[in-house]
Amino acid sequence: MNKINHCLYPVAGLGTRFLPITKSLPKELLPIIDKPLLQYAVEEAHLAGIMQMNMVVSDNKKAIQHYFSDPNPHAVDKLKKLTHLQQLMDDCDFHFVKQKEMRGLGDAILCGNEQIKKEEGAFAVILPDDLCAINTLKKMVELYQQHQCCIIAVEQVPASLVNRYGIVEVATKAIDERVYKVFNMVEKPPINEAKSDLAIIGRYILTTDIFDFIKKTKSGANQEIQITDALKMKAQRGEVIAYHLPNKRYDCGTPSGYVKAIKDYAAQLSN
Ligand code: G1P
């Protein structure tokens, strides 16, 4: 009952910040050196013991399906670099569900309702734009096993950037190492209205009743159905905790964050 089997990857977005390359290459396949962002995300879920990978895609994301389902054109045994990808493809099932309209992250997550049944208890969500330490989701799955509620990853961001994120208010006293009860959250608040500088980062463990809460959620920031608004209802019932990330994460949804990630990963290679 405590096991998390599914991870959902909302990857239908257009990637306009990375045009023109995203005209034909999904932004989730942009590489950090030689490996796409989405493979880092799948490896993170795999390490957390998750084998059901659910990609929420749009029509122009065929390359993602191709990447995770087609046989390698190169002989795997000769190219060590491909064996890890092959291992992921052997171990995991990849499902693709289409998000018909871009109606926000909450709506994208609701598309997972087809694949993820209520009896599963909970599932994970990774936003591959946020590149995190490989053991991040594993730690969050462990926290779920202990606390049995929704869990969001958070990080402190500069005050000038709070309007780009879901911002949370948490209790001052930790309930576990780096773990805090969440009592409120707001999606992309104006800078002068933000109640804290703790931002939601793209890692979530969601209990499956979240689907009912999303169905009740009205359009919010950017006229979109926001997962933050659905989670706020759960937080007000005391059913959400925040995990303050101990490691650096890279915002690869922006060119500057993406370049920073490449520089740091490249530095590790040459060491
Ligand atoms: C989404 C979430 C937001 C979160 C962010 C993390 O926003 O809606 O709450 O802080 O991811 O990357 P987006 O980046 O899709 O605008």
Image: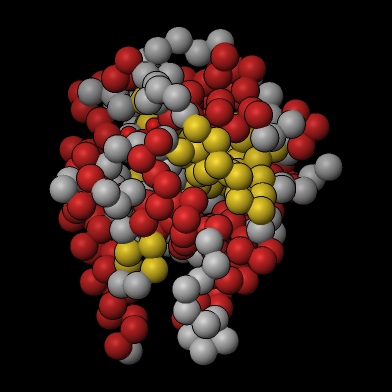
Q: Is residue 225 left or right of residue 50?
A: left
Residue 136, horizontal then vertical, whole percent: 53, 58
Above or below 174: residue 230: above
Residue 86 appears in the rendering: yes
Q: Position of residue 235 (x, y in %)?
A: 57, 24
Left or right of 93 on screen, residue 129:
left
Q: Residue at x 55, y 67 (%)?
A: 71
Residue 185: horizontal and vertical position, in percent? 44, 25
Which quadrant would residue 123 be assigned to in this image? top right
Name the residue located 24 percent from the left edge and 55 percent from the top edge.
257
Residue at 60% x, 65% y is 88
Quarter where residue 249 is shown: bottom left
Pick the residue in front: 177 or 236.
236
Name the quarter where the C terminus is drawn: bottom left
- Residue 101's quadrant in the figure? top left
Q: Nearer the viewer, residue 181 or 204?
A: 204
The answer to which of 140 and 266 lies nearer the viewer is 266
Splitting the image into four quadrants, where does ligand 1 fall? top left
Scheme of image coloration: secondary structure
Question: Of residues 202 and 236, which is closer to you in this image?
Answer: 202
Residue in view at x 77 percent, y 48 percent: 3
Residue 171 visible within the image = no
- Which quadrant would the N terminus be assigned to in this image? top right
Q: Position of residue 202 (x, y in %)?
A: 44, 44
Asked if 213 appears above or below 199 in the picture, the reply is above
Q: Is residue 115 above or below residue 21?
A: above
